[in-house]
Amino acid sequence: MRRVYLDHNATTPVDAAVLDAMLPFFSEDFGNASSIHNFGQRARAAVETAREQVAALIKARAQEIVFTSGGTESDNHAIFGVAQNSPRAENGTPHIITTSIEHEAVLNTCQALEKKGIGVTYLAVNRQGLIDLGELRQAIRPETILISVMHANNEIGTVQPLAEIGKIAAEADVYFHTDAVQSAGKILVDVQAYKLDLLALSGHKIYAPKGVGAIYIKSGTRLKQLLYGGHHQRGFRPGTENVPGIVGLGKAAELARIALADDNARISALRDKLEQGLLARIPDAHANGAQASRTPNTTNIRFPGIEGEALIIALDLKGLACSTGAACSSGAVEPSHVLTAIGLTAPDARSSIRFSLGRHTAEEDIDRTLEIVPAAVAQLRGLSPTYRRQAITLR
Amino acid sequence: MNRSIALDSLPAAVAELTPGLVAVAMSGGVDSSTVAAVLQRQGRPIVGLTMQLWNQRRLPELQGDGPEQHRCCSLDDVYDAKRVAQQLDFPHYVVNFEDQFEQRVVRPFVEQYLAGRTPIACTNCNTDVKFEPLLRMARQIGAETLATGHYARIRFAEANGRYQLLRAREDSKDQSYFLWGLTQEQLAHSEFPLGELSKDEVRALARRMNLPVAEKPESMELCFVPNGNYVQFIQAYSLERKLPVTSAEGDIVREDGAVIGHHNGVHNYTIGQRKGLGLAAGKPLYVLSIDSKNNRVVVAEDAALRSSAVEIEDVNWISISEPTAPFSAEVKIRHKHQAAPATVEALPGNCARIRFDSPQRAVTPGQAAAVYSGDVVLAGGWIK
């Protein structure tokens, strides 16, 4: 069975060029980047090249990039790092502002801090998934130490106005962090234009392997480190560098930077074809948050009367991979906090599924999807007691 | 009788081949894992579905000490089901039915207990979760039928054009008592491949097919009560959900109203219970009834616990259409009860009256009565 993969917001395949770049650093150039000998020097050179490549993707300077194990560590580092470095006594209990649609890497970190007595404001979003800048301004208090707003949302693709938020943060003299895991490599990311102090990104969302990521820390940012150990990465993020992973992340960042404009145009055209095709072919289907500025690869569509979970399984059995909500530890689907935050009822949230395209998505993948999904939705609705009931009451 | 059987000598009803995708409800235990393996050996396309029913992190105070016991809905069981699917190489999905399970099983269970009844959660789970939303999901994803590890049998009777529910061939494992709520539609789309097998045969098959769960112990307790302590669970859940609990102490009385002791909340008692009453009477006394309205527990001597007639409600006529005249049958009023001869009469409003040939002990409101004719389950209902 030819399988179609439309779940690139979950993860991406390692690009062939990325894999090629990584391979020598497993067995041939296996040195520890901290060693003084030639083996170490070759690894060090590769790591520093990667640092420059990642910096270039987000318009940062190389020394502002620290490699981590991924987006979750980077988010934890940024948020815990700021919170634990703030002098408590000065302005009372420290306060953080974030949004209600963040990834768990941010949400659960903030919740952990709340248990330690730190105040957290979770900004609401409108139906398109955008925060209100007025509300953000009002939420800032003298004791606010950090604003953490994700760049692009993983489920609906909404892109927050980081430039405006950065301006507000700078005026209030509050650190500004963004989770750019879903935007880096997909749309322009510019730490200077957005006046960012901190940014998290992840390798496996941009065709590098899993288990590697980076945090951007603007020079001069006062941040407590998360891990303690050796002197790697200036002692700020100890642990022997994952050289092949870092090399892969660097290469992937370079490829993304070069291909960004072309990828963007091609993928958004395919996404639009998919979205419009589904809305045209399936009665009573709606795109969630589609009016906002979105990442070019993401569409989230709700099909009232179906259980998204059942549709995902039905589609997977037919060879189409897409997703709904967030998987919990057992692998079962939990209702999406993002979709309820944009104002969907629980049943509407459960009837929504996400398609996320990628660099290797072809036109025929979209054509195949446009064949499979309408048939599956019709099959599910035919067996849904709620949909029939709705149809009757509509009459 | 540890008979070893070969895969190619499966009983005919199990070895029969049917085309079409079949979804297997997999709990991670040996029974449902064997169902999946057997169906796959028969060449049937299968998909495994494991229900996430209850978040064990809820009510953490009930976890108790020591290593986790095997029970449904624990992550370990989900992983066991996944391991079986990976080993046999068929698609497997975990599906979230936590909401339905709480609304249709856990909450009614607690509410019934608080109302002085003794509910059976497994029947509700079968009727309202496994063979309702799960079966529907199975069909929505393209499966023709849902196969489960229940020990019971389904047969289509040409004579009356109905699907009939039958006891398992092996009476000691028979679970037909818990399945009387199934509709014709549900029976038509369900399969119980283990109905022809004994537990020993199932374990032998599991070993022979090298299933990683072949030696897994059976779960005996209610799956959502982690440590088997119902009373503790009911209290913790009621507190979390702010259900009114009359945990107030009250009187233990005799049938004539004479107070002979004190109880610490009516939900701590079940009908027929003798132990733990704290009564010092000459003859052994048993709980006769629970009067939650007046917060009393009524006790009596053994003879008073015997009833010769009982009415049931929400009756489901399963293998026959509703009969117009009284008829003779055997009626089972508890899982471990030996079905007793009785005369059964349908009453208006989905009820029925059962008159036992000889009085039965501890007929308990909230439990189910299943009406059999030989191996066939004719009907079932809730004891009023």
Image (cartoon, coloured by chain):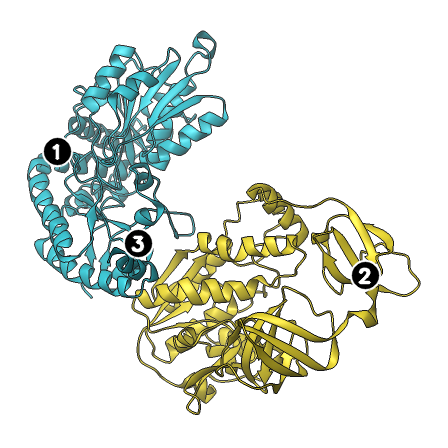
Chain colours: A cyan, B yellow
- In space, the residues marked 1 and 3 are separated at their CA atoms by 34 Å
Image position of B379 with respect to A88: above or below: below
| Front tag of 2 and 3 | 2
Residue B322 vertical position relative to residue A154 in the rendered view, above or below: below
Label 3 marks a residue whose chain is A
Q: Which mark is residue A257?
A: 1
Amino acid type for the residue under numbered disc 3: Gly
Q: Residue furthest front?
A: B348
Residue mark closest to the camera, 2 vs 1: 2
Query: Which is nearer the eye, A389 or A267?
Result: A389
Residue at x 63% of width, y 50% of height? B234
Evaluate if marks 1 and 3 touch, with contact meaning CB atoms under 8 Å apart: no
Q: Is residue A380 left or right of residue B183?
A: left
**Side of A18 where B41 appears, left or right:** right
Reading the image, the residue beneath label 3 is A308
Mark pair 2, 1: CA separation: 81 Å
Would you say the residues marked 2 and 1 are in contact, meaning their CB atoms lie under 8 Å apart? no
Q: Could you tell whether B356 is left or right of A264 in the image?
A: right
Residue B272 placement: quadrant: bottom right
Q: CA distance from mark 2 to mark 3?
A: 52 Å
Q: Position of residue B307 (x, y in %)?
A: 74, 74
